[in-house]
Amino acid sequence: MSIFDLPDEVAVARHFRRALLDSSRHEAPYRRWNLVDTLPEPVGMGIISLPIMPLLIDDCHGVRDIDNNKRSFFTPELQSRFPVCDLLARTMQRPEVADLVGKTCGFEAVGSYLRIEYIQDIDGAWLEPHRDVPEKLCSMVIYLCTGPDAREWGTDIYDDEQRWIGRSKGEFNTATIFVAGPNTWHGFDKRKIIGIRRLMEINYVHPSWRDRTQLCFPEQPIQAL
C-alpha cells in the first residue's frame, strides 16, 4: 500500500499529457522538450518515498552501467511490491500516452517497449558526456530533486565538440525529453550533492533491446490506439 492518496491511472495519464502538450521546445544544440508539473504530486512523492537505498559505488567512472544488477528498474516484480511503481508503469504503457510522446518527438511508439529506472545519485556521482544508444527511441528524465540545490542538479548539455553550453533545471517534477541523435551530447558534471539527486529515466525502446529484465512489461509492446 502507499502512504499517499494516489490518483487513478486515467488521471495520471491526463495530467502527464497536459504537461507534454504545454511543454516548451528548444532547438539548440539539439531538439528537446522541457516540462513542468509533469506528474500529479502524490505520484512524485510516492516515488521518492520508496524504501530503496541509493546505489553506493566508490567510483562510478562516469557511467551508469557499472553495476547493472543493483539498479532500480520498474520491473514486474517491483510493480507488484509498490503501487506507485505499478501506477506509473501502467500510465506510460497506455496507448494514448505513448502515442502522444511518439508524435511529439517523431518516432513510432507502437511496438516499442517501456523502460523505467529510478535513479538516486549521491555525492561523487557524475556522468561523462555521452549520446544515448539509438535503441532508445526517446529519453525522458523526470527530476524529483528536493532541497536548496535542486535547481543545479539538472542534466548538463554539450555541443558537438563536447563543450558545456548549459544545464536543464532540476527542480522537483520538471522533465526533459529528447531523441538520441548524432549531436545529443549530455551528462552530469561532477559537483557537490548534499542529499540525494533523485530522478526517473523513462524510455520507449526498440524491440531489439537486449536486456529484457529492465523492461516494465517484457512481453507486452506498446499497442496501437
Image (cartoon, grey):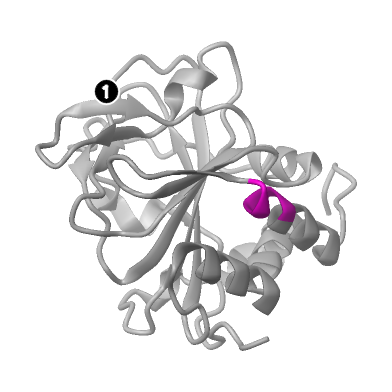
Q: Position of residue 217 (x, y in %)?
A: 56, 78
| Residue 129 in the figure: left or right of residue 195 | left
Q: Nearer the viewer, residue 216 or 180?
A: 180
Mark 1 lies on a secondary structure that is: loop
| Residue 14, picture quadrant | bottom right
Mark 1: which amino acid?
Answer: Lys
**Measuring 53% from the left and 88% from the top, which residue is drawn there?**
219
> Residue visible at 60% across and 74% down?
99
Please provide percent x and percent y for residue 71. Answer: 41, 52
Residue at horizontal 74 percent and vertical 62 percent from the top: 87
Q: Residue furthest right?
A: 5
The image quarter containing residue 57 is top left
Q: Is residue 35 above or below residue 108?
A: above
Identify which residue, 48 or 19, lies in the foreground. Answer: 19
Q: Residues within 10 Å of mark 1 (few under 14, many from 20)?
A: few
Report the quarter where the N terminus lies.
Answer: bottom right
Image side of residue 162 versus residue 168, left or right:
left
Q: Indicate whether residue 50 is drawn in magenta.
A: no
Name the spot of residue 2 as percent of width and height, x first. 82, 49
Q: Nearer the viewer, residue 178 or 64?
A: 178
Task: Find the magenta span and give its range.
Answer: 18-22
Main SS category, magenta section = helix
- Residue at point 30%, 23% (across, down): 124
Q: Residue tagged by mark 1?
A: 190
| 33 horizontally vs 48: left or right | left
Is residue 19 magenta-colored? yes
Q: Quadrant of the C terminus?
A: bottom right
Figure disc tally: 1
